[in-house]
Image (cartoon, rainbow, N blue to C red):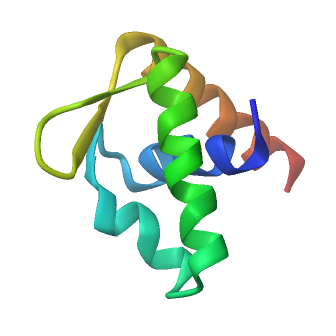
Amino acid sequence: MTSSASQVLKMFGEMGKSELDLHVLLSPRGNEPDSRALVLDAVEELKTSGLIESRGGDFYSLTEKGKKESARIVESSSAAS
């Protein structure tokens, strides 16, 4: 998994949400086109991996597999701090 995809999953876990709007996922990256492209690529990677699914419009939700992986990422980043 790319670091960008891991960061997107981490956002779900840190915010305590199972569904997020694409605009929320993009906001930490600012308006820089390259950074935004990384997020969009990460979203596609996570969809392909079955970790998130589209909920219509710009909304994405974690699958059960994604919830477990998101929790694991948040836990491992907390342990590393």
Q: In the rendered view, would you say 64 is above or below 44? A: above
Q: Residue at x 50, y 88 (%)?
A: 31
Toward the viewer: 37 or 22? 37
x and y, in percent, of residue 21 in the image:
25, 56
Asked whether the viewer can see residue 10, the reply is: no
Which residue is the extreme one toward the right? 80
Which residue is the extreme one toward the bottom? 31
Toward the viewer: 26 or 16? 26
Q: Residue at x 58, y 44 (%)?
A: 42
Q: Residue at x 52, y 29 (%)?
A: 46
- The quadrant in which residue 24 appears is bottom left
**78 left or right of 68 in image:** right
**27 left or right of 77 in image:** left
x and y, in percent, of residue 6 in the image:
67, 41
Q: Tell me the quarter of the image containing the C terminus.
A: bottom right
- Number of marks in the rendered image: 0
Q: Tell me the quarter of the image containing the N terminus.
A: top right
Toward the viewer: 68 or 51? 51
Q: In the rendered view, would you say 10 is above or below 67? A: below
Q: Residue at x 57, y 63 (%)?
A: 37
Q: In the rendered view, would you say 9 is above or below 11? A: above
x and y, in percent, of residue 33 in the image:
57, 79
Q: In the rendered view, would you say 19 is above or below 22? A: above
Asked whether the viewer can see residue 39, the reply is: yes
